[in-house]
Every structure is written in structure tokens, then in C-alpha cells.
Image: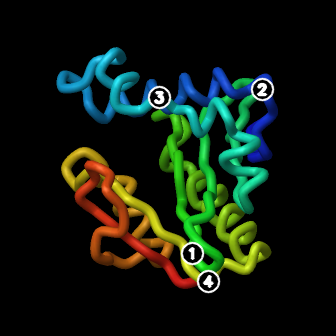
Amino acid sequence: MVEIRPIQQHQIEQAKQIVTAVCLEIWQGVLTEEDLRRYDSMSDIENVRSHYFDNYGTFLVLVDNEQVVGTGAIRRLNDEVSELKRMWFLKEYRGLGLGWKMAQMLFNFARQEKYRKIRLDLVNNERQSEALKLYRKLGFYFIERYNDSPCTIFMEKIL
């Protein structure tokens, strides 16, 4: 049975494996696992309690028979603005409405925390065209750069 629920300590390594697998899929032929580790230490996942839960955020996992198969999170940018982070699903779990469902759960969490907006960034349209389509359907619109990440697409949604 596929469920979405808050990450547990014993699922941290699985969550990191999901992020790694999907990133390597997106950057196939361009990025190695070693390159990815240099670029992204995933310290936010490693320290999920302090980075998300203790800082007015959350980190959810998509679980199928106790195996993590997807991730998604909300982190605080300021009192009114949150950020959608780590929304990664294994290929066989995409296109089934599960991303939409997780996004709605994350939006509900953000509303409960009294955030007024939610932002996200994407590397580019070429590598993440399906994600961009999903975010547009979810009501995100393009905005100016709001961080110093290597991403080229920046989006926001009013909650």
C-alpha cells in the first residue's frame, strides 16, 4: 500500500537514495554520483529534524510496502514564505497522481503554519519538463530569482 507520511529517522538513508537516483536519472550522462555528492551533501535530509521539523517545516516520504519511493518537503524562508523542497519520486511512481497528492499535503501544512506563499526552484525546463508541467498545474507562476542556487527556473504560488 502506498502512503504519504512524515519521514522517520530510519528512513533518512532511503530518502537520500531516492534523491540520488532521481538526480542521476535527470542528469544521466552529465553528472556522476561523485559529482552529485560534491554539489549536494544532503545535510538537510541528514539533519531533517533541525532543518525541517524544528524550523516550521516538514519532510514527507512516499512509502510503498515500507520502502521509500518518493520525497517532498516544506522549509521556512521567512514568516510568510516557505519553499517546496526535495520533491523527487522514482520513475514508476510518477504520473499516478501521487505528486499532486503530496503537493496538496505540503500546501495544507504550509497553510496551517500560516505561510502566505510557497516558492520552488528547478534546474531548467529541458531536464525537468514534467516537473514544470506539474507545478504549473498546481498554480505556480514564474518569478525572479530568489536564491543563489544554480537553478534557472524560479516559481511561486499564493496559498
Residue at image position (31%, 35%) is 26
Residue at image position (59%, 39%) is 44
Residue 40: horizontal and vertical position, in percent?
A: 41, 32
The residue beneath circle 4 is: 116
Residue at image position (64%, 23%) is 14
Q: Amino acid at mark 3?
A: Ser
Task: Determine whether 107 is above or below 94 in the image.
Answer: below
Do the CB atoms of the residues marked 4 and 1 lie less than 8 Å apart?
A: yes
Q: Earlier in the sequence, mark 3 or mark 1?
A: 3
Q: Amino acid at mark 4?
A: Arg
Decide if residue 100 is on the left or right side of residue 50: left
Residue at image position (56%, 33%) is 43
Q: Amino acid at mark 1?
A: Val
Residue nearest the viewer, comparing 98 with 102: 102
Task: Determine whether 8 is above or below 120 in the image.
Answer: above
Task: Determine whether 122 is above or below 16 in the image.
Answer: below
Q: Earlier in the sequence, mark 4 or mark 2?
A: 2
Element at label 3? loop
Do the CB atoms of the residues marked 3 and 1 lie less than 8 Å apart?
A: no
Decide if residue 154 is on the left or right side of residue 79: left
The residue beneath circle 2 is: 65
Do the CB atoms of the residues marked 3 and 4 lie less than 8 Å apart?
A: no
Element at label 1? strand
Q: CA distance from mark 3 to mark 1?
A: 24 Å
Decide if residue 54 is on the left or right side of residue 22: right
Q: CA distance from mark 3 to mark 4?
A: 29 Å
Q: Which mark is residue 41?
A: 3
Residue 95: horizontal and vertical position, in percent?
A: 49, 49
Task: Determine whether 150 is above or below 153 in the image.
Answer: above
Q: CA distance from mark 4 to mark 1?
A: 6 Å
Foreground disc of the pair 4, 2: 4
The residue beneath circle 1 is: 81
